[in-house]
Amino acid sequence: MKIGIIGSGHIGGTLTRRLTALGHDVSVANSRGPESLTDLARETGATAATAEDAVRDADLVAIAIPVKAVPDLPDLSSKVVIDANNYYPSRDGRIEAIENGATSARWTADQTGAVVVKAFNTIESGHLLALGRPAGDPARIAVPVAADDAQAKQIVMRLVEQLGFDAVDAGGLDESWRQQPGTPVYGTDLDAARARAGLAAA
């Protein structure tokens, strides 16, 4: 699959490493420009790109950036976009729609016109890098996946499974608050059964 990743920090860089290792054709971009991604590109075989080039022909886009930077993204209309972001007012400033009850994923969808799938926002980057396990392994970690579009959700859930994690259906975008910071599934490395219980209990 041709995947564009915007963000080269903890999660974006880790997704670049893991997805290229699985054989996906990855282009990675950040706010500092392709020249700042030379080392990551050399390490992984990914293509260092501008954000516009990373998403242009991508089958799937992943964003792992501060939420406040979402309005500055290139055109993502109708693209399937994995939203791995988390809203932190101390970093992002107050975003009124989110403060008034919208999930950050819903706000991102509204801002971009993308088909948004919330995933990879609950797992620590080091665990995403190193703790993937075969299906059926009792140590396998669950990753909640929320989306309104069933087909897009299935694409991302298959990718989660390919990376070595159990994909747990977390409902639609308006339910994705159940996997936001401060909830039982955030940063807790639960197995699938406990992740489902944590989403329900949030």
Image: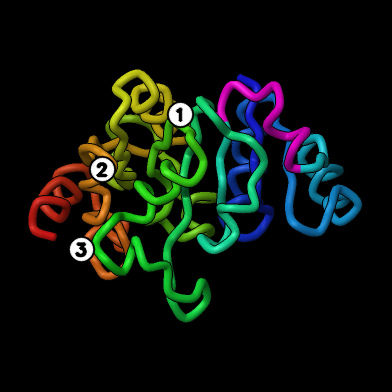
Residue where numbered disc 2 is placed? 138
- Please give the name of the residue rendered at 76% of the width and 40% of the height, measured from the top-left corner: 44
Residue 81 picture location, percent across and down? 50, 35
> How far apart are labels 1 and 3 at the CA level?
23 Å
The answer to whether the residues at label 2 and label 1 have Cβ atoms under 8 Å apart is no
- Please give the name of the residue rendered at 39% of the width and 51% of the height, measured from the top-left corner: 107
Numbered range of the magenta stretch: 51-60
Disc 3 marks a residue whose amino acid type is: Pro
In the displayed structure image, the side of residue 64 where residue 160 appears, left or right: left
Q: Can residue 187 be seen in this view?
A: no
128 relative to 172, above or below = below
Residue 135 picture location, percent across and down? 33, 30
- Please give the name of the residue rendered at 37% of the width and 55% of the height, measured from the top-left corner: 104
- Please give the name of the residue rendered at 91% of the width and 52% of the height, measured from the top-left corner: 35
Residue where numbered disc 3 is placed? 184
Quadrant location, the C terminus:
bottom left
Please name whichever residue, 92 or 158, is drawn nearer the observer in this view of the structure.
Answer: 92
Residue 165 picture location, percent across and down? 37, 39
Between tags 3 and 2, which lies in front? 3
114 relative to 36, above or below = above
Query: Tag 3 or tag 1, which sits nearer the N-term?
Result: 1
138 relative to 125, above or below = above
Query: Tag 1 or tag 2, which sits nearer the N-term?
Result: 2
Quadrant location, the N terminus:
top right
Asked whether residue 104 is drawn in magenta, I would say: no
In the displayed structure image, the side of residue 145 where residue 131 appears, left or right: right
> How far apart are labels 2 and 1 at the CA level?
20 Å
